[in-house]
Image (tube, rainbow, N blue to C red):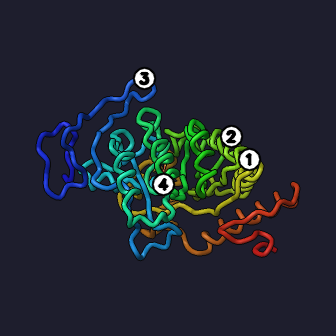
């Protein structure tokens, strides 16, 4: 185990977190019942991306580990195994809270070597998962980043971000701010089955509309697109149209990706949820992390065509997908 709980009197060399002087674990009550919070003091809060990363940002912040949104397909599940917890129920219920995230961030932002590069939140676990209602770390992080002149982006599946519209609007007046959502489908049955701890995606759209109305740049990634569950052309078209109508941009799309413990978790869930589809997955994936290029291209094209169609049927406002103007990319 590479870390210890906050009430453990023994610190250890080489741990990820400093546990001295902290209290925990704490059982969630009321709307947080069923959750367990493990408070730790993080040694650092700004995480550099590996030099080989293709992501368009070099720094990330994740104030929480584990995620009560409990998405069946979540790719971050293995991070709990590094902590000696399991990638299934522990990931969904035992939430590690970096209790000193705001004060630690202020120290790091004040370092003269900090170059005010873009910081991405929501790259690993959701910064607006249920724990944020109690600990308010993301809210404090937003303020600290803005006051230091550091641009940032947030990716979330939660409508809790609406709570922070005031500090986000203030931040957007000082630095480049982007609040993005992950919306794979608006299909209620699929949402309920695959993202049981999240608010309905239509509530994310309402939050998106509020961000747009406040002048905050916003949009959504159509992801993950789940083969046989949320990849019908009509489903994708409905999602794309709703994002654009809410005032967001369609940032792109991503089909399901399955690897390691996340793969096992998802396939176990699918075999109970829909045995016939599970058998089709085994045959189609054949041990690969994702379906072939034809499928990936089909999904991207379906999303782009839906955006083009919606653009033609609405006021013609130009939209961009995957960073490219739609008009040039879609015939
Ligand atoms: S919201 Fe994101 S981090 Fe949280 S469980 Fe779902 S996919 Fe994982």
Comparing 119 with 259, the one in front is: 119
Name the N-terminal-most of marks 4 and 2. 4
Q: Quadrant of the C terminus?
A: bottom right
- Mark positioned earlier in the residue sequence (3 or 2): 3
Cα gap from disc 4 to disc 3, whole angstroms: 36 Å
**Residue labelled with disc 2:** 206
Count the marks: 4
The disc placed on residue 30 is 3
The residue carrying mark 4 is 148
Number of the label disc, if any, that sits on residue 246: 1
C-alpha distance separating marks 3 and 2:
25 Å
Q: Quadrant of residue 190?
A: top right
Mark 3 residue element: helix
Relative horizontal placement of residue 112, taking residue 133 as reference (left or right) = left
Q: What crowding class fits label 2: few (fewer than 14 Cα within 10 Å), some (14-19), or many (20 or more)?
A: some
User: Where in the figure is residue 79, as x and y percent of width and height?
Assistant: 34, 55
The one nearer the camera, 146 or 313, is 146
Q: Do the CB atoms of the residues marked 2 and 1 lie less than 8 Å apart?
A: yes
- Residue for point 47% across, 57% down: 123
How far separated are the C-alphas under marks 4 and 2?
A: 30 Å
Q: Is residue 256 above or below residue 138?
A: below
């Amino acid at each position: 185990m590479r870390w210890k709980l906050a009430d453990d009197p023994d610190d250890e060399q080489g741990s990820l977190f400093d546990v001295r002087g902290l209290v925990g674990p704490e059982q969630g009550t009321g709307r947080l019942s069923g959750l367990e919070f493990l408070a730790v003091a993080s040694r650092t809060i700004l995480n550099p991306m590996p030099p080989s990363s293709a992501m368009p940002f070099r720094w990330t912040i994740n104030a929480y580990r584990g995620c009560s949104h409990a998405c069946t397909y979540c790719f971050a599940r293995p991070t709990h195994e590094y902590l000696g917890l399991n990638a299934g129920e522990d990931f969904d219920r035992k939430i590690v809270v970096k209790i000193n995230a705001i004060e630690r961030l202020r120290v790091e932002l004040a370092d003269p070597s900090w170059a005010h590069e873009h910081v991405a939140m929501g790259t690993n676990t959701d910064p607006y998962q249920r724990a944020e209602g109690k600990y308010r770390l993301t809210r404090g992080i937003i303020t600290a980043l803005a006051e230091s002149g550091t641009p940032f982006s947030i990716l979330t599946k939660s409508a809790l971000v609406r709570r922070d519209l005031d500090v986000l609007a203030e931040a957007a007046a000082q630095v480049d701010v982007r609040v993005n959502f992950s919306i794979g489908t608006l299909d209620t049955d699929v949402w309920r089955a695959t993202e049981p701890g999240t608010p309905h995606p239509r509530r994310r759209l309402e939050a998106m509309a509020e961000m747009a109305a406040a002048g905050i740049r916003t949009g959504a990634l159509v992801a993950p697109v789940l083969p046989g569950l949320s990849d019908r052309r009509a489903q994708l078209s409905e999602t794309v149209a709703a994002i654009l109508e809410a005032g967001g941009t369609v940032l792109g799309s991503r089909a399901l990706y399955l690897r390691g413990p996340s793969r096992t978790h998802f396939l176990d869930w699918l075999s109970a949820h829909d045995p016939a589809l599970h058998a089709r997955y085994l045959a189609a994936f054949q041990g690969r992390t994702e379906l072939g290029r034809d499928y990936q291209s089909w999904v991207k094209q379906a999303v782009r065509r839906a955006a083009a169609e919606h653009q033609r049927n609405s006021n013609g406002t130009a939209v961009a997908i995957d960073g490219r103007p739609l008009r040039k990319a879609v015939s």
